[in-house]
Image (cartoon, rainbow, N blue to C red):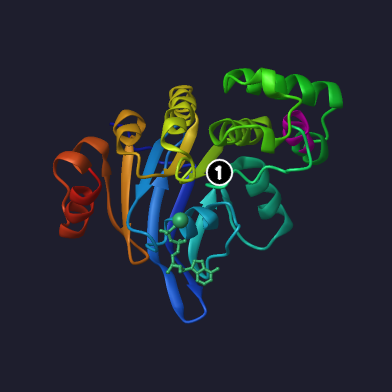
Amino acid sequence: MQPTTQNPIIKIRRASKFFGPFQALKDVSLDVDLGERVVVCGPSGSGKSTLIRCINRLEKHEAGQITVDGTELSDSRESLTKVRTTVGMVFQQFNLFPHLTVLENLTLGPKRALKISDKEATERAMDYLERVRIPDQADKYPRQLSGGQQQRVAIARSLCMEPRILLFDEPTSALDPEMINEVLDVMVELAESGMTMICVTHEMGFARKVADKMVFMDHGEIVEASDTESFFTTPKSKRCQDFLEKIL
Ligand code: ADP
Ligand code: MG
C-alpha cells in the first residue's frame, strides 16, 4: 500500500459540479499522492468523466476546492497555466488532429506551449513514439492507423508535454477487443515508471495490476475509495459489490 503523505499532488475537498439543476458531482473529496495510481470505476453517468475533467479544468467545479501541485484551481491565469502544464489527458476518442501527421500531432504542443525548438520537439516526439512502440508510424496521418495505434499516439502526445499527472478517460472503451492490450501494456509501463495517474476504466485486470487506490463512484458521489486489495476482496458498500459482480 502507498504511504499516505502530508502533501498530496491532487487534493479535492468537497467539490461539487452542477449542469443546470442537475448535480453531477456531490461533495467529492479525494487525495492523490505523487506517483500514486488511482483507478476510478462506476456505472455510466456516475460522474467519473466530470470528476477528472474538473481536475484539468475542462469543467469548472462550483463548490469546494481542487488543488493541483499546490495551486488551487480557479479562473486565474496562473492557475490555468499551472493546470495546463501539469496535467495531461487521454480521451476515449483519441482526439488527434486529423489533418496533421503523427509527428506533427506530437510536436505541436511542445513547440507552441512550451516554446521548445523544432529539433528538440522532434527528438522528444521520436523518444515517446519509441516508448509506445510505433516510431515507424511518425509520418502517417491518424486515419491511416488502427485504433490501438491512434490511442498510443495520443498517449505519446500527452507525454511530450512532460506532465506530472496523467488522466485517462476510458482509454480503451472505443477500441476493438484485440487492440485493448497494446494500449493497456503501454499504460502499465507508464505506471511502473512512476507516473501519477488517474484512470477511469473498467479494465479490472489492469486495475488489479497497477492501482494503488480504487475509487467507486455512483450518482455523483465517491461511494468507496480504498486500497486495491481490500476493494476487490472486501468491498464495503452494497452498491460497489453489485457493480463488481456485474463487471467481473
Ligand atoms: P460518467 O463518465 O461516469 O459516465 P459523466 O461524468 O460523463 O458520467 O456524467 C455524469 C452526469 O452528468 C450524467 O448524468 C451526464 O448526463 C451529466 N452530464 C455530463 N456532462 C454534461 C453536460 N455537459 N451537460 C449536462 N449534463 C451533463
Ligand atoms: Mg465518462
Q: Viewed as shown, does residue 72 lie left or right of 118?
A: left
Q: Which residue lies furthest to the bottom in this view?
A: 21
Query: At 78% from the left edge and 26% from the top edge, which residue is drawn?
Result: 121
Give 76 or 16, whichever is nearer the viewer. Answer: 16
Give 83 or 107, whichever is nearer the viewer. Answer: 107
Q: Is residue 203 above or below residue 245?
A: above
Where residue 245 sits in the image (x, y, percent)? Answer: 18, 49
Q: Quadrant of residue 221?
A: bottom left
Q: Viewed as shown, does residue 79 lie left or right of 121?
A: left
Query: At 68% from the left edge and 36% from the top edge, which residue is drawn?
Result: 142
Give 191 or 78, whichever is nearer the viewer. Answer: 191
Query: At 21% from the left edge and 51% from the top edge, which residue is drawn?
Result: 246
Query: At 37% from the left edge and 42% from the top edge, which residue is drawn?
Result: 39
Where residue 112 sits in the image (x, y, percent)? Answer: 82, 40
Q: In this view, does 149 lie above or below 46?
A: above
Where residue 243 sits in the image (x, y, percent)? Answer: 23, 54
Q: What stretch is highlighted in magenta?
A: 102-108
- Point out the image quarter for the N terminus: top left
Q: What amino acid is at disc 1?
A: Asp
Magenta segment includes 109:
no
Give 103 or 122, whichever is nearer the viewer. Answer: 103
On whether ligand 1 comes within 8 Å of the CB at mark 1, the answer is no
| Element under disc 1 | loop
Say few, some or many: other residues with alpha carbon within 10 Å of mark 1 (under 14 / 14 to 19 / 20 or more). some
- Point out the image quarter for the C terminus: top left
Q: Viewed as shown, does residue 7 lie left or right of 55?
A: left
Where residue 20 sits in the image (x, y, percent)? Answer: 52, 80
- Which residue is under mark 1? 69
Q: In this view, does 234 lie above or below 117?
A: below
- Magenta stretch: helix, strand or loop mostly: helix
